[in-house]
Amino acid sequence: MPPIFRNLLAVAAGLVVGSIINMVIVTVGPILIPPPAGVDMSELDQFSANLKKLQPVHFIAPWMAHSLGTLSGAFTAAKIAASSKMLLAIGVGLFFLLGGIIMVGAFGGPLWFCVVDLIGAYLPMAFLGGKLGEGEKES
C-alpha cells in the first residue's frame, strides 16, 4: 500500500477508534457517577443550564473520555502510519481539540473544567499516544 494511503487510513482509524472510546466513556460515565437528582444531561436544550448543577466529580468521565479518546486515537494513528507518525498523532489530537473548542463555545461549562480539558486532555494525550505508537527507534 502506498505510504500516503496508509497514512490516510491511519488518521481515519485513529479518529474512529478515538471517537468510539470517547462515546463509550461518555455513555458509561453517568451510570458510574450519576448526575444530581432532577438533572437530565440528555436534554440538549437544557444542557448548558444542567452543567451548572454538576459537582466536580461529574466532570471526571468527560475528561477521561476526551483524554483517553485522544490518547487511543493518536496511538492508533501512529501505530498504523507508514511515516510521520508523531505528526499524524498530533493531527488526530488537533481534530479532537477542535471538537472540544466547539463544545466549550456552544455549551460552556465551569471555567476550571474548560481550561483543564482544553489544555490537558488533547495535545498532551496526542503526544503521549504518538510516542507510544512510534515504538522503539531503531539504532
Image (tube, grey):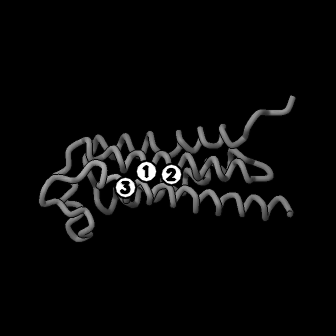
The reply to whether discs 2 and 1 touch (Cβ–Cβ < 8 Å) is yes
Quarter of the view holding residue 138: top right
* Dot 2 and dot 3 residues touching (CB under 8 Å): no
Residue in the picture at 19% in, 58% down? 50
Name the element at disc 3: helix
- Residue 63 located left or right of residue 20: left
**Residue 139, image x, y percentages:** 87, 28
Residue 1 numbered mark, or none: none
Chain-order first, disc 2 or disc 3: 3
What residue is rendered at 20% in x and 49% in y?
54
Q: Could you tell me how far apart the alpha carbons at marks 2 and 3 are, in whole angstroms?
A: 14 Å
Left or right side of 51 for 84: right
Mark 1 surroundings: few (<14), some (14-19) or many (≥20) residues within 10 A? many
**Residue 16 versus residue 77 in the image, above or below:** below
Q: Could you tell me residue 29's position as x and y percent?
A: 34, 52
Q: Which mark is residue 69?
A: 2
Q: Earlier in the sequence, mark 1 or mark 3?
A: 3
Could you tell me which residue is drawn at 49 percent across and 46 percent down?
Answer: 68
Amino acid at circle 1: Ala
Give x and y (percent) for residue 108: 28, 55
The residue tagged 3 is 28
Residue that protrudes farthest toward the left in the picture: 38
Quadrant for the N terminus in the image: bottom right
Residue position for label 1? 65
- Rendered view: 12 above or below 137: below
Q: Secondary structure at mark 1?
A: helix
Q: Which amino acid does the dot numbered 3 rest on?
A: Val
CA neighbours of label 3 inside 10 A, class few (<14), some (14 to 19), many (20+): few
Specify the amino acid type for callout 2: Gly
